[in-house]
Amino acid sequence: MGTSNYSDEFERDAVHQITVRGYPVREVSRRLGVSTHSLYKWMKLFGDPATATTVNVVLRLDGLTHTTIDCVSLR
């Protein structure tokens, strides 16, 4: 795996545009000229857990049992 051609500041700004400002990954990818793969990688590296939204999903089976699944969204 090679080194990045972009500064940390550039990568963090790209992540900010997606996670905080709400722009779609595809749009940021096109506008900045970077791959969506890179953006997802940077989101994993620089994504702020405080801005992530945690959602609890409860599944009910026949009204008798339930399973709780924690899902994390970066939006």
Image (cartoon, rainbow, N blue to C red):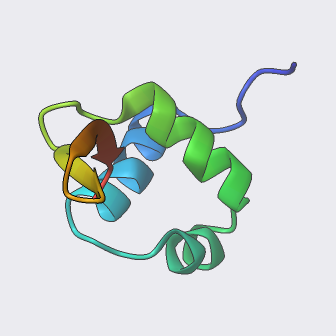
Image quadrant holding the N terminus, namely top right
Quadrant position of residue 2: top right
Give the residue at x 71% y 30%.
4
How many labels were placed on the picture?
0
Residue 13: x and y in percent read 35, 50
Residue 12 drawn at (x, y percent): 38, 40
28 with respect to 73 (left or right):
right
Q: Going 48% across and 33% down the picture, which residue do you hit?
A: 44
User: Residue 70's x, y, as percent?
Assistant: 28, 37
Q: Is residue 8 left or right of residue 6?
A: left
Q: Residue at x 24, y 43 (%)?
A: 66
Q: In this view, does 35 lie to the left or right of 56?
A: right
Tell me where residue 52 sits by quadrant. top left
In percent of the image, x 24 and y 51: which residue is there?
A: 57
Q: Where is residue 29 in the image (x, y as percent from the top left)?
A: 61, 69
Question: Relative to residue 71, is residue 46 depicted above or below?
Answer: above
Vertical side of 53 occupied by 9: above or below? above
Nearest to the observer: residue 13 or residue 67: 67
The relative height of residue 1 versus residue 33 in the rendered view (above or below) is: above
Horizontal arrangement in the rendering, residue 25 relative to residue 71 (left or right): right
Quadrant of image for the C terminus? bottom left
The extreme right residue here reads 1
